[in-house]
Every structure is written in C-alpha cells, then in structure tokens.
Amino acid sequence: MATKPEQVRSVDPLDVSRAALYRDDAWHAPFRELRATAPVHKVEHSDFGPYWSISSYKPIVEVESLPDLYSSQAGGITIAEFIEHKDAVRMPMFIAMDRPKHTGQRRTVAPAFTPSEMVRMSENIRTRTSEILDSLPWGEEFDWVDTVSIELTTQMLAILFDFPWEDRRKLTFWSDWAGDIELAKDEAHRAERLSHMYACGAYFQKLWDQKVGQPPTPDLISMMIHSDAMREMDHLEFLGNLILLIVGGNDTTRNSMTAAAYGLDKFPDARGKLETDPSLIPNAVQEIIRWQTPLAHMRRTATRDAELMGQQIRQGDKLALWYLSANRDESVFEDADRIIVDRPNARRHLAFGHGIHRCVGARLAELQIATLLEEMAARRMRVNVLREPERVAACFVHGYRKLPVTISSY
C-alpha cells in the first residue's frame, strides 16, 4: 500500500529569517511589503519558530525604549534558540541582560570606548590603516574582505584585548562561529560551535590568569579584572561577554568597511562627491553604516502582554527587530536604498541599536571606518568591484565573505 507523502509546510513569503534572502541579496522586496502593509507581523512558522517581525523605524524605537517590557535577557538577542535544547549551555553576556546587572557590566567596558580613548588610539589606527593600504597591489585583483576589512578589524581586536599578535586570526575564526546563528538548526554544527567557543574561553582564561594581580592596563581583560561588576564572573559568563565583544568588534566594523568599497562602487555619483569633498567623510561613515546595517536584527522577548501598533503581543512572544529594514524606512530616510554621502539625517540610523543597549563600541567603529576613508582619499585610491560579492547566508550578521576588487587612482 502506498504511503501518504509527508505534508510539506509552505514557505511564508514574509518570513524574512530565511538565510537565502541574505545570501542572494533578495531581502529588499519582502521588507518593503512588510513596512507598507504589516510593520508588526506575526510569522507563525519559521526555522526559528514563531516570531513577530518588527520592520519599520517607529515600532523598533518603541520596543527599544521599553527594555523592562521587551527583555533582552528572557530569550537572548537573536531569533535562534541556542538555549532551548537538552544540552544547552548558557553563556551570559551584558547585551543579553536586563537592568540592573546590564548597567554594571556595561559600565565596566565603556571606558575602553570614551572620546579620550578614541584620541589615544587614533594614531595607532591611522598607522595600521596606512600600512595595509600601502601594501595593496595596484591594478591587480585581490579580496577586499580578507586583505583589508578582516585584517584591520582583527588587528584592532588584538589591541583591545592585548591578544597575542601572531594568533590574532583566531579572533576572526571564533567570531565567525559565534555569530552564525544558522548553526542552531543542526545538532552537529551546534556541538562544533560549542567546542570552538570552549577553545576560545580556554585561550582567554590563560590571558586572564596572566593579568590577575597585575596593575591595571588599558585593555578589556584588565578592565574586567579590576571591575566590581565583572571580576567575580563565572567561566561561562566570562566567555559570553568575550564572545559579545569579539563579534561586536569584528563583524560590524569589517562588514561596514566592505560596504564602503562595494557601496561606493555601486553608486558612482556618491563616490564622486566624496572624492571631490573629503570633508563629507564623517557623514558618509554614518550613511554607509545605515546602508549596510551589519547586524540585521536583534531579538527581544515580551515579559507581559502588550499592544504594539494595534497588534496584541503576548507574554513570552519573540520579537525580531529588523534594523536592516528600519534603516530603509522611506518615511525616515528618503531614497533609502541609495548611498547619499551628504544625507542630512544619516546619523538617525538604527544600525547600532537604540536605548540602553546601543552599541558600546560605536565610536570605535566610526573612527576605524573614517580613518580608512581618509587614508584612501589621501592616496586618491578608488576601489573597483570586479564581481558581485559572496555574501553571508544568515539573517543575523549581514555581511560579506569575499569581494573581488582592483584599486586605481582618481
């Protein structure tokens, strides 16, 4: 007797968590429809379970402004459920904490990113940026992602952590594994990810042990050791915060640096305006970060029943805040799909989040990208994209694997 074929669940065209949308750069249309017709939309079935899709600017700001109602701690910060299976390991991090614990731990690392620290680090950032740009082969094909974006951001992370220079690419490797939420769908990859995170923790534990009892130094590990809020962290909480700082410092800056090369090539009018007037660089940095939005979403969990733009949110519901979509909201950013280097409100972007969880390292990311653009301008260096990039296939890190380019003079 013939068996009944298993019923295949149809794909919700408005389920914007599908990895293929980002791999193929095909996310624009579904988000445009969501913003126009259902900015607060319930997706009943996805690979990550049911969730609310929050896709326009105003409701995302509302959710971010109510951190006690919409918790970062209750379910974590991504729509992937790394903590809901039998062998789950919790790695607490302050971005996924609520007040008051979030406040104390954030205050610990915040001094690494103050304006005075930016001044202190700026010369080093400029020197390293200059060295990498001066090493590039003019007129020959190379991968911008690996040669420029990854190398610059990984060097910066090594300095922030006082990490052994010769092992700095380990930071890139761990960041890529930590930030890939697609791994949550598969038990084997989930286990492999965990093993890499433990290796990361073991390496950093040695660095921690070397600094215990030593005078304070201006690196993040020393700041944790000398902080009342963080010195008594257990191993998993230490590891969670390390992963947060590695992914936050790596993926966001590196993918915005690649967006600077790719996006300015895609919009030659914007590139020409910037080449003619380098004083636009600070604003262009904000615009490039808005246009790229290197982390596509953050997740919140409702702590009680609530109403959001007429929709009934229930206690325990998962909300995906699509910063990527909010930064293309035409009601806020006119002609939002284009890079406009002199856009008057570019700084209103939500790529760094909003409210108490706004990215603690935002100033450092801006400084690194601005320095890159300034040093390119000083060399009259233009990046020419040869082929479409290879993109990250994921709905969390919105980024690039490879970008084949040449450089020429203008």
Image (cartoon, grey):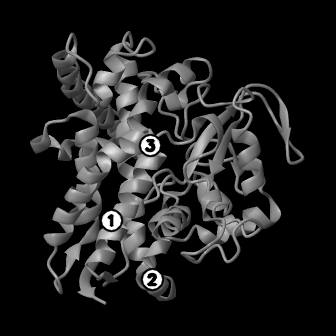
* Mark 1 element type: helix
Badge 1: few (under 14), some or many (20 or more) residues near its Cα, within 10 Å?
many
Badge 3: few (under 14), some or many (20 or more) residues near its Cα, within 10 Å?
few
Residue nearest the viewer, comparing 49 with 161? 161
Q: Residue at x 31, y 82 (%)?
A: 382
Q: CA distance from mark 3 to mark 2?
A: 29 Å
Q: Nearer the viewer, mark 3 or mark 2?
A: 3
| Residue 116 appears in the figure | yes
Q: Residue placed farthest to the right in the image?
A: 310
Judged left or right of residue 176, residue 46 is right
Q: Residue 100: where, in percent of width, then height?
A: 61, 18
* Circle nearer the N terminus (3, 1): 3
Judged left or right of residue 126, residue 371 is right
* Mark 2 element type: helix
What residue sits right under mark 2 in the picture?
A: 271
Q: Residue 161: where, in percent of width, then height?
A: 26, 34
The type of residue carrying mark 3 is Pro
Q: Residue at x 74, y 62 (%)?
A: 34
The type of residue carrying mark 2 is Arg
Residue nearest the viewer, comparing 11 with 307? 307
Above or below for 249 versus 374: above
What's the mark number on residue 115?
3
Q: Residue 389: where, in percent of width, then height?
A: 36, 73
